[in-house]
Image (cartoon, grey):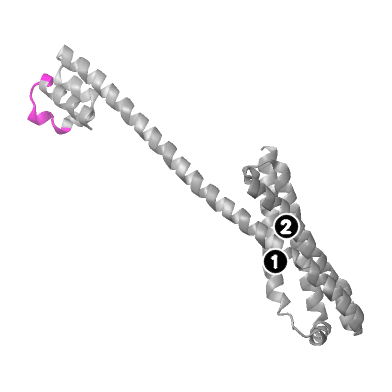
Amino acid sequence: MSHTEIGMRVAGAWLAAASVLLIVTFLGHGPIHPDLGQQMKDISHGMSRWVIVHWIAAVSLSLFAGASLVVLTTGSRLIESWWALSAWALLPVGALWTMTTAVAEATVVANAATANDVARFEAWWAFAEGNANGFMALCLAVAVIAANETRSDQVGRGGRRHRRLRRLAARHVVRRRAGRTVLGRLVDRDESLDAVVRAWPGACRIRHSHRSSRTLARVIRHRIIRH
C-alpha cells in the first residue's frame, strides 16, 4: 500500500470520527442566551454538560485539523486544483481557531460562571466569540471541498463512460474488419456452408433461406458492413 493510500485512509477515519463528535456537540450544546447574566446561570446550572460538550468539540476540531494536515502531505488527487488545496489549507486554520473557543469555554468561562465573576466571564466570553469566527472559515473550507469532490465525481463518471464507449467502438471496428476479412476469404474460396457458419455463428439464423454457401457468405458480409 502506497503512502498516499495510507494517508487517505487515516484522513478518512479521522474526518469520520470528527464529524460524529461534532454532531454530538451540536446536539448537546443547546442555544446561547443573548443575556450574559442568564447565560452565566445556564452554564453554572449545567456545569458538567457544558464542560463535557466543549471538550468533545475540542477533540472533534483537533481531528479536523489533523486530518487536513494529513491530506496536505499525501499529495493525493484531493489537492490537485488550487481551490481545493486552498480549502484544505484553510480547514485547519478554522478548526484551530474554533478549538481555542471550545477550550476557553470549557475551562475559564465555565469557572468564571461558577464563581459568578462577571468581569472575567465577560472578558473571556468576548475572546471566545472572536475566535468562534473561525467556524465560518471551517464551513467555507468544507463547502469548497464538497463542491470539488462533486465536480471530480461527475468528471470521473464522464471519463469512465467515454473510455467504455471507446472500447466498445474499438471492439465493433475489430469485429467488422475481422468479419469482412474472414467472410471475404470464404466468398473468394467458395467454402462450404459449415465453414461460413463457424466463421460467424449468427449465420445460423439465416442459413435456411440460402442454400448456397457463396450466397450466404455474401449476405452475412453485407450485414456486417452495414451494421
* Element marked by disc 2: helix
The residue indicated by pointer 2 is 64
Indicate the position of residue 60 as horizontal and vertical percent values.
Answer: 74, 62
Callout 2 amino acid: Phe
Specify start and end residues of the magenta stretch as a single range.
205-214
* Element marked by disc 1: helix
By secondary structure, the bulk of the magenta-drawn segment is best described as: helix
Give the quadrant of the N terminus.
top right
Could you tell me which residue is drawn at 20 percent across and 30 percent down? 226
Q: Is residue 18 left or right of residue 50?
A: left
Indicate the position of residue 157 as horizontal and vertical percent values.
Answer: 47, 46
Question: Magenta includes 210?
Answer: yes
Mark earlier in primary sequence (2, 1): 1
- As drawn, the label of residue 22 is 1
Other residues around mark 1 within 10 Å, as few (<14) / some (14–19) / many (≥20)? many
Seen in the picture, residue 161 relative to 93 is either above or below; the reply is above
Distance from Cα at disc 2 to Cα at disc 1: 10 Å
Could you tell me which residue is drawn at 75 percent across and 55 percent down? 92
Callout 1 amino acid: Leu
Could you tell me which residue is drawn at 88 percent across and 76 percent down? 123
Q: In the image shown, does 144 or 13 lie closer to the viewer?
A: 144
Question: Magenta includes 82?
Answer: no
Check if mark 2's residue and mark 1's residue have beta carbons within 8 Å.
yes
Where residue 109 sits, quadrant-wise, is bottom right
Seen in the picture, residue 144 relative to 163 is either above or below; the reply is below
Where residue 166 sits, quadrant-wise, is top left
Indicate the position of residue 224 as horizontal and vertical percent values.
Answer: 22, 28
